[in-house]
Image: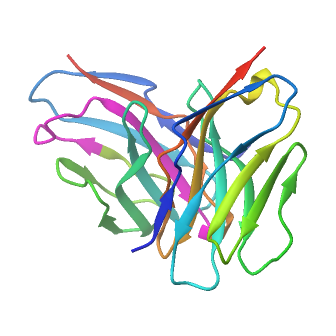
Amino acid sequence: AQTVTQSQPEMSVQEAETVTLSCTYDTSESDYYLFWYKQPPSRQMILVIRQEAYKQQNATENRFSVNFQKAAKSFSLKISDSQLGDAAMYFCAMDSNYQLIWGAGTKLIIKP
Amino acid sequence: DGGITQSPKYLFRKEGQNVTLSCEQNLNHDAMYWYRQDPGQGLRLIYYSQIVNDFQKGDIAEGYSVSREKKESFPLTVTSAQKNPTAFYLCASSMRLVDGYTFGSGTRLTVV
């Protein structure tokens, strides 16, 4: 069975610093997609970044980037220059046939 | 603008009552999903539909029912058989799973 694991229930970072959120997954597929979603206190789920497994190059969206290690089945999210608005739950997900498989989430706290 | 609308935002249910949560999208997406989110937890799939007049059970379908009579609409009924319905419910849609989901803003259901 395909699984997604986020081992950090909570992380904190000082404003303007960099933080990395971890995600590991398990799949027997060779081609798949990985996602990071953000859920701020409003609870609206927002797509942060997406990575195609067959692409070697790590995806980047402004201050958000991923470190994708296919062999290790690792997909971490790096947030640079952390801002107060980055405070949220972050969920890692992977596509699997008919649905996305979700991790349990990491709560990110930004210290001013 | 295209998007997904969930209503109501807050819903209160008495013991033994059925209630229906609305989910409407104007994105022309084929697939629609219902998820349940409990405090501090990830997303659990209740039901999904990949095409009109067809839907499938997810991981926690017991006590819930859905219909998909129109492409735009995917209502979720929480029946009296659902013993612990208090939760946050998210509806999502997708054209291609590899593009990820678009989410509604959610409905908070509370049993009183």
User: Could you say where residue B35 lies in the image, as x and y percent from the top left?
Assistant: 40, 48
Residue B99 shown left or right of residue B49 in the figure: right
Q: Which residues are magenta?
A: B77-97
Taking the spot 32% from the left edge, 61% from the top edge, the residue there is B58
Which quarter of the figure has residue A58? bottom right
Quarter of the figure that contains the N terminus of chain A:
bottom left
Asked whether B56 or B67 is in front, the reply is: B56
Counting from the top left corner in percent of width and height, residue B50 is at 45, 70
Observer able to see residue A11: yes
Q: Quadrant of residue B36?
A: top left
Q: Front-most of B20 and A24?
A: A24
Q: Residue at x 68, y 27 (%)?
A: A87
Quick one: A110 or B61, which is closer to the camera?
Answer: A110
Q: Position of residue A4 (x, y in %)?
A: 50, 60
Quadrant the C terminus of chain A occupies = top right
Would residue B92 be counted in the magenta stretch? yes
- Residue A106 vs residue A52: left or right? left
Q: Is residue B33 above or below residue B98?
A: above
Q: Is residue B26 above or below residue A87?
A: below
Query: With B23 as the anchor, is A48 left or right in this view?
Result: right
Taking the spot 56% from the left edge, 69% from the top edge, the residue there is A95
Residue B68 visible somewhere in the drawing: no
Residue A71 placed where, x, y %?
66, 78
